[in-house]
Amino acid sequence: MQSAKNEFLHGIKDELPILVGVIPFGMIYGILALSAGLSKAEAQAMSVIVFAGSAQFMLVQLLGVGTPALVMIVTGFVINLRHALYSASVAPHVQKLNPIWKTILSYLLTDEAYAVAITHYYKKGDSTRKHWYFLGAGLALWSSWQVSTAVGVFLGAQVPPGWSLDFTLALTFIALVVPTLKDRPSVLAAVSAGVVAVLTAGLPYKLNLIVAAVVGIIVGLWSEQQ
Amino acid sequence: MNSFWLTMIIVGMLTFGIRLSFIVILDRWETPPMIQRSLRFVPVAVLSAIIFPELILRGGTPDVTFENLRLIAGIIAILVAWKTKNIIWTIVAGMGVLLALQYFL
């Protein structure tokens, strides 16, 4: 049985590769937010209050072109709807935790923390302290998002796009998914979700992710029945 | 307090609500077996839905030719991930191939 501290540190460690892709993204967000007319305090506060990269990017772009508040709110909501899938997916694993834990882990439930935490939950071993791993991964991401926002906002610094560091995010997700493709239903779920995501990429607000995930899940269930 | 603060706070609360939603709902509600079985496919489906467009789309249009360097790097990374099951090696291989191709082509 892993101790709470070990789980926590392990979560931080496993989140590190993702941070390579997230940090440049946070810096760009900080710079964009200021150029859209946000104050430094507003730009930084949004990283704490909203804490969702794509939604933050979209909101500052909409603000920059003078979009009404209601439209920005609906847009932010729709972009983040995909997190409902993550919520359902982690729900059975956090069921026994108290409300404070559930609140904290929900706040930290981003794409990047979810990817790492859910992979850990599915790994063998019946540790009852995997929520500490989730917390470690979530806090590692949270801190780097705040610091990288601050670097963009207060120093105006960014990583040259030619370094292609954003690609590390896709690579990390590949490293997390590929080893879990152990049976036919998961392979078919992965391929069908991926293809549908490409075909529906024209949908606004990342809705293609939801459509693709639902198709992938249905294909997986169907294949299981065969 | 100007209206952007209010917008930001509302979006923040909605986002938190979405993230908390099923953690609360599935706690109180006897989950049908169908839903329980589908949950196993959520990670693989969602992550693949994020990965594929990153590899295949260039400027919003699908490109499955050898001109698409991210696709080549991604395929190599998939092979490395499959062989090694190691995150660091996968990233090193994928980034190495991408940067090398960007540099030499």
Image (spheres, coloured by chain):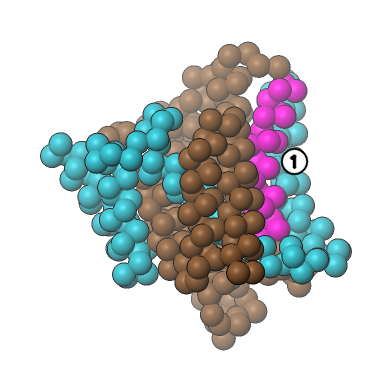
Check disc 1 and report the residue beneath it: B13
Hue used for the chain lettered B: cyan
Q: Residue A174 location in percent, x, y?
A: 41, 57
Relative vertical location of residue A201 with respect to residue A174 in this rendering, above or below: above
Q: Residue A134 location in percent, x, y?
A: 58, 64
- Magenta residues, dominant SS class: helix
Q: Quadrant of residue A55?
A: top right
Name the residue nearer the viewer: A150 or B86. B86
In magenta, the rendered stretch is A69-90
Q: Residue at x 33, y 51 (%)?
A: B74
Point out the image quarter for the C terminus of chain B: top left
Magenta includes A167? no
Q: Quadrant of residue B101?
A: top left
Name the residue nearer the viewer: A140 or A194. A194
Q: Residue A29 location in percent, x, y?
A: 49, 32
Relative vertical location of residue B88 with respect to residue B6 in this rendering, above or below: below
Image mark 1: chain? B
Hue used for the chain lettered A: brown
Callout 1 amino acid: Met
On the question of residue B77 being in view, the answer is yes
- Looking at the image, the residue that sits furthest to the front is A226
Q: Residue A18 location in percent, x, y?
A: 43, 53
Q: Quadrant of residue B102?
A: top left
Q: Which residue is drawn at 30% across and 34% down?
A: A160
Q: Is residue A145 left or right of residue B104?
A: right
Magenta includes A75? yes
Q: Which residue is drawn at 45% across and 55% down?
A: A173
